[in-house]
Structure formats: structure tokens, C-alpha cells
Amino acid sequence: MSVFPFDAVIFDMDGVIVDTEYYYLGETAAFAKELGLNLSQEDLNAQVGASHQFFLHMLVDWFERAGKGHFTGEEALARWDEWAHKRPRDYQALINPGAVETIRELPRRGVRVALASSSSMNSIVEVLGACGLSDAFEYVVSGEQFKESKPEPDIYLHALDLLGLPADRCCCVEDSVPGITAGKRAGLTVIAKREERFGFSQDAADKIIDQLPELLELA
């Protein structure tokens, strides 16, 4: 067995551990159709990798553009939540192949694992619980803890502070452009889980993998 080249791996959640990005787009398209928001594919794709704060901004903009009224972010979110709560999500069915096994195996090899997601902490807790990963990460960081989430590097810089490690001893696993950008700005080696459904480039990543178990082959 080769020696793993990093002391810690910091994981993104949506699109990396669970295939939620594509699912959320379908959900948003259904929401928009029912409420008559008339969203373009570009509008939908802008959601990929977006922070919780940016999603609130998008909701407000969509309602206003459609002439549905002027809402605060929290008011728009309440409309979304009312709709979404009637449609429970099966996160376990969305787990990417080998994700749980890889996350569990890394600490057995002496590699520390943390999570840095743009999602709200409530969403993170819900997803990790459904996937059996509530106790898997040494640290869990949410984008809502910062004034600016990804693509700004703050979330990763904070994760590094918690780990007490320099950026050159860690890598992050991402999928979206905001996430890849945040990782690079933080000085991390960025490994991207391949994503070809949304039309964006992952070329800025240091390495692209198809599935998470490939992490265990890094040397």
C-alpha cells in the first residue's frame, strides 16, 4: 500500500459525497414551474455550487422577475421550504458510489478528514445523518458561518485552522467552479470529482477523478 500524500482531506458535500446538485436542479425546476417563475437553464445551473446565502439571493430575484412580489431572503426561503417539505428527500439513495467507504477508510490509514460545505448547517446535519456519516468528520464547517462563502477561500482557511495544518499538507475534494476556486485560493491541492452535466470546466483543479475511491490510490 502506497503512503497517502496528504495529512488531511477536506470534503465538499453536495455533488461530491451525495449527488444532490443534479437532484436540486430538478427540484428547483419543478418549484419554478408550479409557481410560474419561468427559469432558464442558465438560471438553474447557477445554483450548482452556490452558497446558502446566494441561493436566497436567487430566490428573491426569481420571484421579483416573475412579478410575484418583493420578498426578503427569509421570506423567499419560507416559500421554498413550504413547498420542499412536502417532498421528502431520500439522501441515502443519492450517495455517490464508494463515498462512505472512502471517508471511513482514510482515517484508518492515518489521514484526517473534515467537511467544508456551502450548505447551511441544518442541511449538512440532515444529509450526514441520512448517509450514516454524522460521526465521520473531525470538523464540519458550513458556508453560512462566513460573510462570503465559496468561491472565497474563508471556509477552507477556517478548516485548515481547525486542523492545525498548512495548506500544502492537505487536499480538498470539490466538483463545482466556486468550490474549486475556493480551494485554489486557500492554497490547497484541489481534486475534482468529475461532473459533465452542467457545462462548466473543472480544468482549474489539480486532478480529476471519476469516483471517490480513487482518492485511496493517490501517491
Image: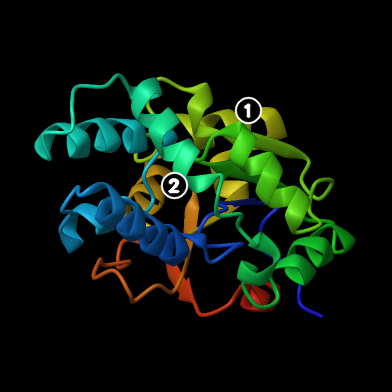
Which SS class for mark 2? Answer: helix
x and y percentages locating residue 35 in the rendered image:
27, 47
Give the number of the disc on residue 161: 1
Give the distance between the C-alpha atoms of the residues marked 1 and 2, in whole angstroms: 14 Å
Please tell me whether residue 119 is drawn above or below residue 40 in the rendered image: above
- Residue 48 lies in quadrant: bottom left
Residue at point 63% right, 78% down?
214
Left or right: 103 in relation to 178: right
Residue 164 visible somewhere in the drawing: no
**Which residue is denoted by mark 2 in the rendering?**
183
x and y percentages locating residue 130 in the rendered image:
75, 55
- Residue 33 lies in quadrant: bottom left
Amino acid type assigned to the residue bearing label 1 in the image? Asp
Residue 135 or residue 87, whichever sits in front: 87
Q: Which quadrant of the rendered structure holds the C terminus?
A: bottom right
Left or right: 140 in relation to 20: right
Please report whichever mark, 1 or 2, sits nearer to the chain's N-terminal start. 1
Amino acid type assigned to the residue bearing label 2 in the image? Gly
x and y percentages locating residue 100 in the rendered image:
75, 66
